[in-house]
Amino acid sequence: MSTMQDKADKSEHKGESRRSFLKTLWIGLGVVAIAEVVGVVYMYLRPRKQHIKEETFGSVITAGSADDFENDSVTAFRRGQLYLVRLDDGGFLALSRKCTHLGCTVPWVESEKQFKCPCHSSAFNIKGEVLRSPAPRPLDTYTVFVENGIVKVDTNRRSKRNRFESSQVIYS
Ligand code: FES
């Protein structure tokens, strides 16, 4: 009789162990699933950055002779993390490559004459003005100056702006 009781106790104990194991397993799987969801959300929301060498960023960059830049053109300076824009009237404007939404690098799409952010679809015109949100303001600018026909950009001075103004454009 006691043997049968022992067997029943052991069987019940095994059942409890199995239930406990399954409970722990489900909790573990739940934690893993939550961690994956958090990871996916983070990867989606974080700003995507390109790895750009910054040897020249934070200094005055010599862009080149003013004559080398055609009107209505955009030239990327990867190391300076900027675009040198020459407007159709010949004026120069240096724009930051960083989107004013969350800081993604914004490529210039020549065929559409727009800067288009790959992260959340903001778009900017050649002057850096917002054409499509969520970007809250135009692309930041850097100070441009022309010395003896040579265009230079001071990447130490990035300026936020709420709108494009003609005073931001430099003429040679
Ligand atoms: S970083 Fe969000 S639109 Fe550019």
Image (cartoon, helix red, strand yellow):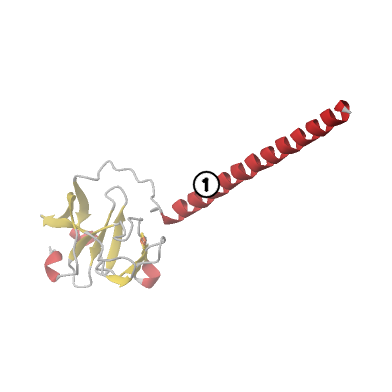
* Count of marks overlaid on the render: 1
Residue 149 shows up from this direction: no
Mark 1 element type: helix
View extreme (top): residue: 3
Quadrant of the image where one finds ligand 1? bottom left
Expressed as whole percent of the image width and height from the top left, the position of residue 103 reads 32, 55
Q: Residue at x 19, y 44 (%)?
A: 59
Residue at image position (24%, 63%) is 85
Question: Height in image: 26 above or below 66?
Answer: above
107 vs 134, nearest the viewer: 134
**Lateral position of residue 37 relative to residue 20, left or right:** left
Nearest to the observer: residue 32 or residue 129: 32
Q: Nearer the viewer, residue 64 or 81?
A: 81
> Which residue: 16% across, 57% down?
144
Q: Position of residue 18 (x, y in %)?
A: 73, 38
Give percent across and percent down for residue 31: 55, 45
Answer with the quarter of the image where residue 14 lies: top right
Looking at numbered disc 1 in the image, what kind of residue is underneath it?
Ala
Position above or below: 23 against 132: above
Which residue is labeled 1 in the image?
35
